[in-house]
Amino acid sequence: MKILFYMPHADAAAWLHDFARALPEAELREWQTGDTAPADFAVVWRPPREMLAGRDDLRAIFNLGAGVDAILALEHEHPGTLPRNAPLIRLEDTGMAPQMAEYVTHAVLRYLRRFDEYQTLQSERRWQVLEPHPRETFTVGVLGLGVLGAQVAQTVASFGMPVRGYSRSARQIDGITAFAGETQFDAFLDGVKVLVNLLPHTPDTGDVLNKRTFSRLAKGAYLINVARGGHLVEQDLLEALASGQLAAATLDVFREEPLPPDHPFWQEPRITITPHMSALTLREESVAQVARKMAALMRGEGVSGVVDVERGY
């Protein structure tokens, strides 16, 4: 078994070491420009086109993340980048769901108990008690009910707030009011106090966090975006904050990362910024999952996590 690895800005030696322990029979190498030697599998994160194009020898391509929008964008810009007969396989959870649930729940509770406003009061040296938002009307809406979204929704619901979930196709999750399909999108949004975005980034979901979406939410609502920066129309967010339609936002993802120092989000005190860290890829868990799937494919067995390239997830 020959494995080709590419992950820029990562400790490649550590990843290769862990793969060697998990698959001692495998031949491993880090891809370098000009490397066209045979390989059975490619393990990648944001690979260049020349790494994959024309590689008919690959059995599968493993993407080191749950989101595959970057590699699909490369295929869209340069058709033929992805080999026809090599399925694209994404990571499934690998410890990301608990991290995401922690991040989102912290942000939701921060707004419920108005800690963001207490922080402002502290900066102004003002001693003032603020009445918490009523828990029973503090409706949280989770856009996207995949592995991450489902755990986020259930974790938030455990704190006694009403939680809604929205997905492309119908889902049933205990304790969550579920909505599905375009015809139920507005009903899902109506009166939501905290909108959490966990949708996959596809041509259909780009710019979904826009003026119209914000207008359906409760007045003074909150936004938490932990999916992709391409979901958010940035100017619409700034205008919604200025008008009071939105009270605040927590953003972990951006159209351009790192966020440029001159970006207006840095100057908006109602926007909380974190550097795309809501759910980090955990190396040991990821290697173990990929190794299991490689072994299964070598035995001729099917695996989960195969991406539908047309749908984008």
Image: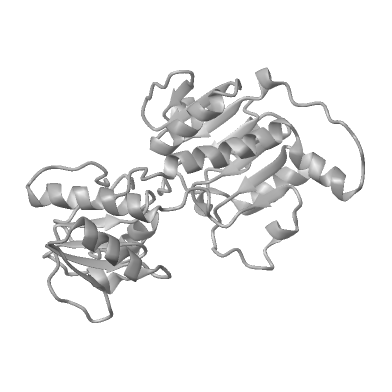
- The one of 242 and 108 positioned closer to us in this rendering: 108
From the viewer's perspective, is residue 128 above or below residue 231?
above
In the rendered view, does 190 fall on the left or right side of 68? right
Q: Can you tell which quarter of the image residue 161 is in?
A: top right
Q: Tell whether 238 sits left or right of 54.
A: right
- Visible residue check, residue 309: no
Q: In the image, is residue 43 above or below residue 163?
A: below
Which one is in front, 271 or 166? 271
In which quadrant is the C terminus drawn?
A: top left
In the displayed image of the protein, which residue is found farthest to the bottom?
34
Colour scheme of the rendered structure: one colour
Rendered position, 209 above or below 88: above
Q: Relative to residue 20, is residue 197 depicted above or below?
A: above
Q: How many marks?
A: 0
Residue lying at 69% horizontally and 68% vertically, measured from the top left: 262
Q: Quadrant of residue 254?
A: bottom right
Q: Residue at x 23, y 41 (%)?
A: 304
Residue 118: x and y in percent read: 81, 40
Percent position of residue 188, x then y:
53, 26
Q: x, y percentage for residue 167?
A: 42, 31
Q: What residue is rendered at 7% in x and 48% in y?
A: 299
Locate residue 276, reporting x and y percent: 53, 55
Residue 264 location, quadrant:
bottom right
Looking at the rendered image, the quarter that the N terminus falls into is bottom left
